[in-house]
Amino acid sequence: MTELLPGAAVAEVGPHFQLYRASADGPVRWRLLGGNNRPLGRSSLDFPDIPACLQELTVLVGVLTDLAGRVDRYPPNLWIWRLALQGMDVVVSAHPYDRQIRARHGMRQFIDRAAVARVDAAVMVTTNRRGRPLTTLLGSRRTETLRR
């Protein structure tokens, strides 16, 4: 049994959306984290400020069943998934997958978790990124090596 110190907050578990930016005044993005804090998917769009990001996130959650999903080959031998609304990509996988079936499973997992996820109130400021930058997943840069 875990004992809490007086006044200690109980951490919420489960899937949650985290807002983040690279600098204090930079554009805001969101990502969905699972209960184990691993990223499940992220926004493919930048937002000018926190209210705009939250508004678009609310819209996204409301139209999850209307999103068109696809799994794409990611050269040379990996797979990524994307979700589009009215032809525009709005969500992309958090990382490439080694198998097409795993990418499809990751996309279903994102949709299932996003429907019940809470939104964290704080915005994380970080320049630290694991693996490839998001722009690489979206296809604009392909020269970096994948970190596992």
Image (cartoon, rainbow, N blue to C red):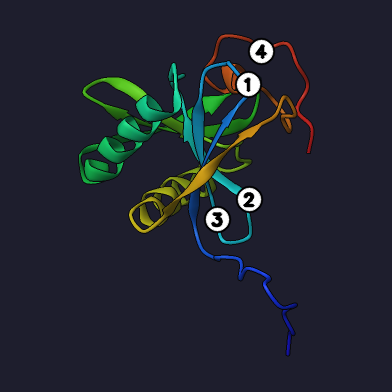
Q: Residue at x 31, y 32 (%)?
A: 55
> Is 7 left, or right, of 12 in this rendering?
right
Q: Which mark is residue 24?
A: 1
**Mark 1 to mark 2 CA distance (whole Å):** 23 Å
Q: Residues within 10 Å of mark 4 (few under 14, many from 20)?
A: some
Which badge, 4 or 1, is on the more N-terminal residue? 1
Which residue sits furthest front?
7
Quadrant for the C terminus, please.
Answer: top right
Reading the image, the residue beneath label 2 is 38
- The amino acid sitting under disc 2 is Arg
Check disc 3 and report the residue beneath it.
34
Q: Which residue is mark 4?
A: 142
Disc 1 + disc 2, Cβ < 8 Å: no
Residue 42, compared with residue 120, is above or below; it is: above
* Left or right, residue 142 beside residue 42: right
Amino acid type at mark 1: Ala
Residue for point 37% across, 35% down: 54
The part of the image, by quadrant, that contains residue 51 is top left
Based on the displayed image, in which of its 4 quarters is residue 13 positioned? bottom right
